[in-house]
Amino acid sequence: MATSTPPTSASGGAPDHQPSLKRAIGPKLLILFVVGDILGTGIYATTGKVAGKVGGALWLPFVIGFVVALLTAASYVELVGKYPKAAGAALYTQRAFKVPFLTFIIAFMVMCSGLSSASAAARAFSGDYFQEFTTAIPPTLIAIVFILALASLALRGVSESVKTNVVLTLVELTGLLIILVIGTWAVLTGGGEPSRLGEFQAEGTGYALLTSVLGATALGFFAFVGFEDSVNMAEETKDPVRTFPRAIFTGVAVTGTIYVLVALVSSLLVPYQTLEQSSGPLLEVVKAGGVSFPPKLFAAIALFAVTNSALINIMMASRLCYGLANEKVLPKGMGRVLRHRRTPITGIIFVTLLAIGLVSTGEIEGLGDTTAFLLLCVFAVVNVAVLVLRKDSVAHEHFRTPTILPVLGAITAIILASPLSERAADVYIRAGVLIGIGIVLWAVNKVWMKLSHEKEAARG
């Protein structure tokens, strides 16, 4: 990978006379994009698994996750302001450390995190929420068809995809507001059990309690991922330097507040043991709220919510392929754009195939925790990168985060990614296999580049 300025430009240019990506995302669309990407699968599907790790004090991991997300979001805002291009964390890593192998692994980890997130969403789609309507279709088949349908939408164009995101975001926000209204009504009418809010699953105190909370926070952090996806849309955003700070901070603040409130309501109304056993935990909250709200209607809302998460992650991963191809980290064919639709066709096909593989071999909790683990590793590197890149000045003004924030962001990300979080072994194995695939791809690309240089030399 070249260490100089990437071939793409802030104006959206692309090498080899490829058509540029279309700048179709304005400030309001970007805010809804960030909110819609963060909301969805995490809160709708993994809330119960978080409760199983921490107990009734379900709100605590979401509070901690909110703080950790804000720390890293501040670093992303500074970096996307300095370098408003596709490729995100990979671009920042290369500029900071200039180690092509590290850059490729970070890029591959980001891509795989998006795919494992989309796969978790697909699994959530085919779980308890879908079971409200029918149990006749195998869940794995439902999940695969789901991925293929979203890939087809992504091929149509960024404008269509982002507008669909707006509709789905409003639907999933409605679903969470329904939960809050039901919870408020239940509490006002004497329902709920406040004592659960201080109930921890771990016996005793000290180390066991600490690892229990860290484990729950590490998994719960999956609910906050998404703001980092938006930086990969920088070349399709109008005036990204000014637009991104407000969009990312607003998105994280809105979703963090909603998450904590939903966690409080869930714990008040439903025992954590019941939440843990469900792949549709918020449906349990609706049923326990004492309000006559149709479970099938809420299940439909939840299905729209997880659809949104999967769609945006497929969009992110395909744009990352496009950006890396333009950076010559992947073969240039990976950056091929569908001329009529101006969408990264090769990237979309590639990530769809990988997502189908993941959805066929994993479940919600494992895929969600894999997403969180991969991104926590990436976030640690990005928080260090923002400090290293302080020496790299740019001509335009941009947001600058206080130095203490990326320092704390790196420390907290490392802690949550460590064995202190009591993460299941299969998560580390899955992540290790994915990274191993990345190493193989790196070697293949090196050979490809070497052969290309030899052919050029022979012609010359």
Image (tube, rainbow, N blue to C red):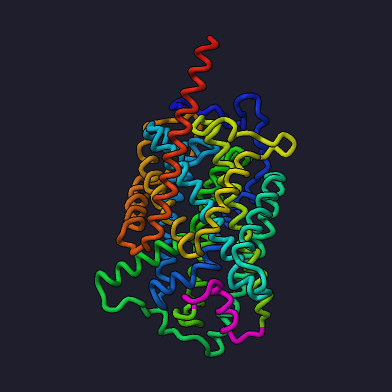
Residue 339: give x, y in percent of width and height. 72, 34
In the image, what residue occupies the spot 37% across and 79% down? 198
Q: Nearer the viewer, residue 257 or 125?
A: 125
The single residue placed furthest to the left in the displayed view is 206
In the image, what residue occupies the spot 62% across and 67% down? 138
Residue 429: give x, y in percent of width and height. 39, 55
Q: Quadrant of residue 272?
A: bottom left
Q: Is residue 317 magenta?
A: no
The single residue placed furthest to the top in the displayed view is 460
Q: Quadrant of residue 15?
A: top right
Q: Nearer the viewer, residue 195 or 451?
A: 451
Circle count? 0
Residue 396 left/right relative to 378: right
In the image, what residue occupies the spot 61% across and 61% down? 143
Residue 113 left/right relative to 54: right
- Span highlighted in magenta in the image: 275-292
Residue 202: give x, y in percent of width and height. 32, 76
In the image, what residue occupies the spot 65% across and 58% down? 146
Q: Visible in this render: residue 391?
A: yes
The single residue placed furthest to the bottom in the displayed view is 190
Q: Quadrant of the N terminus?
A: top left
Q: Is residue 220 above or below residue 356?
A: below
Q: Is residue 301 above or below residue 442?
A: below
Residue 155: give x, y in percent of width and height. 69, 45
Q: Is residue 335 above or below residue 30?
A: above
Q: Visible in this render: residue 399?
A: no
Q: Nearer the viewer, residue 317 or 43?
A: 317
